[in-house]
Amino acid sequence: MRKIILNDKRRISPFNEPARDLRVLNKPLWLHQRDLLARYCSNEFAVDSFDDIPPCDGELLIYRANIYFNELLIQTFIEQARRFNAPHRIAFRLDDPTISQHILHLQTDIKRKGDFYWGDMWYYPRWPADAEPAPLIIDSEPLELGLYNVPRYMVDTGDFVYQAPLRAFLPICSWVHILLANTLCGPYSEARRALKNQQRWSFKLKVALRVLLERKYYLQTSALVKVGKRCEIDPNAIIEGPTTIGNNVTIGPGVVIAQSLIGDNVNIMQGCQIFVSVVSDGCWLPMRAALFATTLMENATVAQNACLQGCVIGRNSFIGANTCFTDLNLLGQPIRTMNRGRLEEVGLPIVGGAVGHDCRLGSGFVIYPARTIESGTILVYRDGYTTIDRNVSRRETPDLWEKGVAFTNPDYRGDWDDWE
């Protein structure tokens, strides 16, 4: 089978990069796609449109370059499409909770047509096709997971939950989708898969044997916590699965990690707390840093006592000590973020902010929910200005540059003039 990748050149704010180059689950999205499709596809072509696809007698898998999908989704899609041996396009039911409650917000690529939501993924037994693709309905099989019984001023029902999918499909059109790919479709989806496996007797027996042999609580056994090579983990650290830890990782005393992904060469010092988060290769978390549902791209640093909830931090960025990303609209209104030049609801009751690549944030800043800080920005403490209540970019907040609170990193190599 050949795979055809439809180029997507839209740049995701505030990173100023196409979605395919951004990191998802500690891999560039293009590499994540390639690894999952390696067992199905022998070669690939990147084109700008269907008109550029060359004739092919064999099978074709076509998808847009900005799409995140997991292993179970692509396996189900290809197996069912091959069974029909006819052109098909991925589709979802209108009442699919994951799609309707989480994925549709800020979207431009999932479109309603008739009784289904259609996504940009196709299967053709040959090309050119002799028929229009029919909808191939994929059930994401979501399970309600999350924090329960929160105060009603946070969520009207009193329940703060995610619809965690077993089969994940997410076109990335906004920084919020990077967040969802690394939380809802990452650790939460893994937890959903683990809960389904718990119904199997073979899995129950495996976990029971690990509990007896390792003398640990079952969430802390090696059945659910995967640890790489040459790691130093203090015996007073608490790690609960499903969690994956890479190679050459140092974890200090008093650290708590639950349902997260930790990359290679990461240093997590004493007292840090990491929940449902992705910490990519080369990151450093000094004392008492706290992450919840947050993504750190490679070589990011979050200094002591910083608090990040629902955030995405770009590569090579530094978050100063005592910096707090707030995540709740105290006025009880839906949280909105800039998308395609206008404010749109993010569809989440709690969400933090996004910091681009190669940024430096000084100590003690307070960032309002859903605000973004553009790549290459340096924020400094000056004249008591420590509250960030607007998006920070050279074009949107020139007054901050005039005050000397924000300015461009002289070492930044991004192309400001190429912004789209």
Image: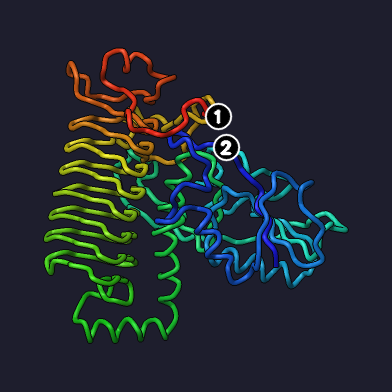
Q: Is residue 142 above or below residue 317?
A: below
Ranked by sequence position, the earlier of labels 2 and 1 is: 2
Question: Which residue is rendered at x = 32% and y = 43% of the image?
Answer: 316
The quarter of the picture where residue 152 lies is: top left
Q: Is residue 262 above or below residue 402?
A: below
Numbered tag placed on residue 230 in the rendering: none
Asked if disc 2 and disc 1 are in contact, CB closer than 8 Å, the reply is: yes
Question: Which residue is rendered at x = 48% and y = 44% of the image?
Answer: 177
The quarter of the picture where residue 224 lies is: bottom left
Where is mark 1, residue-wise? 420
Q: Quadrant of the N terminus?
A: bottom right
The location of residue 103, given as percent across then percent down, is 53, 46
User: Three-letter amino acid code at disc 1?
Assistant: Glu
Where is mark 2, residue-wise? 10
The location of residue 168, given as percent across then percent down, is 53, 58
The quarter of the picture where residue 257 lies is: bottom left
Packing grade of label 2 (10 A; few <14, some 14-19, many >=20) is some
The location of residue 68, given as percent across then percent down, is 53, 53
Packing grade of label 1 (10 A; few <14, some 14-19, many >=20) is few
**Position of residue 322 in the picture relative to residue 196 (left or right):** left
